[in-house]
Amino acid sequence: MSLADTITETITGTSTGTSTGTSTGPAARTAPAAGSGAHTSPLIEARKLSISFGGIRAVDDVSFSVAKGEIFAIVGPNGAGKSTIFNLISRIYEPTSGRLIFEGEDITSVAPHTIARRGIARTFQNIELFEHATVLDNLLIGRHCRARPSILAEMLFTPGVRREELRHREAVEEVIDFLHLANYRDQRISGLPYGVRKVVELARALCAEPRLLLLDEPASGLNTEETEDVAFWIDDIKNDLGITVVMIEHDMSLVSAVSDRVLALNNGRTLALGTPAQVQSNPAVIEAYLGGDA
Ligand SMILES: Nc1ncnc2c1ncn2[C@@H]1O[C@H](COP(=O)(O)OP(=O)(O)OP(=O)(O)O)[C@@H](O)[C@H]1O
Ligand SMILES: [Mg+2]
């Protein structure tokens, strides 16, 4: 359910839930409780972050901080600037102004290829996998940032290289077990249902062993049951793996189920920041969603 649907439902008492596709996960469990984590030190902070594209201020003076162990959602109508924030954190884009601090270190200008190694992994709004490679190969590619290549050692296939190769394969197998992907291990991505591809993309991000996981619309295109599975995965990722999650999502049922706090954006600017209930009832958020942009 989108935030616009939720707001409409709140006002009119109607529901617009949909169901299509294939489920792979533990949908039979009880829904996880949100807001249960103890939050102390910030893992990532955005300080007055801005970026312009031509005349468009895609992100305009946005500040937030996410505590270790928190599940933090970013919501907003199409074009609000949500994915741009992930592209700034991933260092795909250079901010016009503002700072990004990760684990107390300023990462605003660090080289993009160091981001994954520092402990930040992400999924993309449009799934980005190697279509003609198998699930296993895509996940091994996800280990790339953890590799310590020495061409000579690789050529000689030294015991150290063998040990490292084994370590990567074990890490990938753990993620395959964790996300129930064993049945798909040797299948090519191109032959998989959409819902399974979404889980594989999540798996690939987990293979990088992140401390911060950025999920760009993890439930988009999924049916109700698959969306419930995503809620459980996110809860397990937080509780079992100890990974902090920042999630962009239109589905407010998922946001409410798993998020501790929510940042609402519109036209690049902050509309509201608070608990899911506070943000959903915020007049500026309601206006943004019912005002024609959503
Ligand atoms: N590389 C770019 N060049 C020009 N404009 C861009 C670029 N990236 C983003 N924008 C613009 O910035 C604004 C915010 O885009 P963004 O993709 O962050 O929105 P979003 O909140 O993720 O929306 P959606 O829910 O549709 O995914 C939009 O107006 C978009 O067209
Ligand atoms: Mg987006």
Image (cartoon, rainbow, N blue to C red):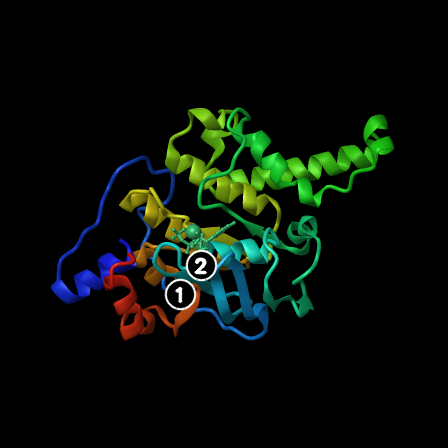
Q: For disc 2, does the CB lie below 8 Å from ligand 1?
A: yes
Q: For disc 1, does the CB lie below 8 Å from ligand 1?
A: yes
Side of 149 relative to 264 (left or right): right
Side of 161 relative to 200 (left or right): right
- Residue 170 placement (x, y as % from top left): 64, 38
Q: CA distance from mark 1 to mark 2?
A: 7 Å
- Residue 80 placement (x, y as % from top left): 40, 59
- Residue 84 placement (x, y as % from top left): 50, 56
> Quick one: label 1, few (<14), some, or many (20+) residues within 10 Å?
many
Side of 146 relative to 175 (left or right): right
Q: Which mark is residue 81?
A: 2
Circles 1 and 2 in contact, beta carbons < 8 Å: yes
| Residue 58 in the image: above or below residue 143 | below
| Residue 172 in the image: above or below residue 97 | above
Residue placed at 32% from the left, 74% from the top?
278
Q: Which mark is residue 265?
A: 1
| Residue 2 in the image: above or below residue 185 | below
